[in-house]
Amino acid sequence: MSRFEIVSRRLLAPTVTLMEIAAPRVARKVKAGQFIILRVDEQGERVPLTVAEHDLEKGTITVVFQEVGYTTRRLAEKQVGDVISDLLGPLGRPTEVKHYGRVLCAAGGVGIAFIYPEVKAFAEAGNELTSVLAARSKDLLFFVDEIRALSKELHIATDDGSAGYHGLITDLLSQLLERGRKYDYCIAIGPLPMMRATTALTREFDLPTTVSLDPIMVDGTGMCGGCRVTVGGEVKFACVDGPEFDGHQVDFDELAKRKRAFFEEEQCLLNPEIVRLEQQAGGKRG
């Protein structure tokens, strides 16, 4: 088995791929909440991906990603036996795992893959888990049985009502919290709007909440500053200070703006025809 060889892959949902990669050194050291940065090939950009699982005996790590941009689409084209050019990790601070008591785990979209190792770690620490998973529709849900097996309660929300509660995850979370049941800790991972709304809700109930942030990253060692976020009025680097932070202290408005910094360039890569037409029309991009 070659270094960074793709050992197995499968489609979890439309545009969502699970990929097991040979990386024995990373597998020996990675902990819940940490991530890796990889390049598909020598000309590719560096992209961070959370490690969903690891296998010490096989020397592999498992990542789950959604095809949302040029690089993740390129990565999805890779097949078993292909090799990833570069892989660096584990990076970031591990999740602070301890016995909190009753833990509320909320995940949306591909965040379900990211919260899975957290759920396992909190369960192993003796916590009583209530897990809430959300997606646009039933066919975009995955790891449901695995997370159910580790949770005392499992709730599902879908935007279209094809599974579980018909509506937003925050509406379902609100119902759970308003029942008066006491939770000691919450972790929320998913799209930025979902995490922002969840932390606004848990703040009302004085429920400590951790979020896992995914700003733009380049080197993953705190040198480039691309992943800076403001937490509690202080500038932090998500790659070395995070990726997990106190959700009640995160400046989500600033983070949303920074995540769109290269939106135009990304669209050009995904739609080269746009660039060609602008060039023909005499358009110019800076």
Image (cartoon, grey):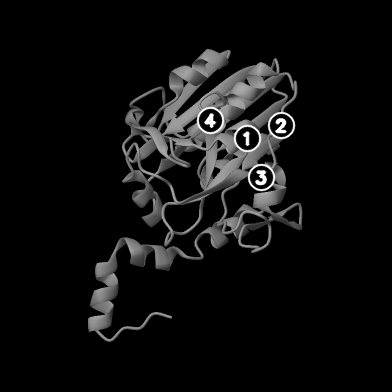
Measured from the top left, where is residue 105 in percent x and y? Answer: 59, 27
Amino acid type for the residue under numbered disc 4: Gly
Amino acid type for the residue under numbered disc 2: Leu
Residue displayed at 68% across by 46% down = 242
Q: Secondary structure at mark 1?
A: loop
Viewport quadrant of the C terminus: bottom left
> Is mark 3 in CB contact (under 8 Å) with mark 1?
no
* Distance Cα–Cα, label 2 vs label 4: 38 Å
Residue extending furthest toward the front = 1
Residue extending furthest toward the bottom = 282
Q: Earlier in the sequence, mark 1 or mark 2?
A: 1
In the image, which is nearer the foreground, mark 4 or mark 1?
Answer: 4
Q: Earlier in the sequence, mark 3 or mark 1?
A: 1
Picture quadrant where residue 1 is located: top left
* Distance Cα–Cα, label 4 vs label 1: 11 Å
Measured from the top left, where is residue 143 in percent x and y? Answer: 45, 24
Residue hosting label 3: 92
Marker disc for residue 207:
2
* Distance Cα–Cα, label 1 vs label 2: 28 Å
For disc 4, the neighbor class at 10 Å (few under 14, some 14 to 19, many from 20) is: some
Count how many numbered circles sit on residues in the image: 4
Residue hosting label 1: 30
For disc 1, the neighbor class at 10 Å (few under 14, some 14 to 19, many from 20) is: many
> Is mark 2 in CB contact (under 8 Å) with mark 3?
no
* Distance Cα–Cα, label 3 vs label 4: 20 Å
> Is mark 1 in CB contact (under 8 Å) with mark 2?
no
Amino acid type for the residue under numbered disc 3: Gly
Residue hosting label 4: 59
- Depth check: give the residue in front, 199 or 218: 218
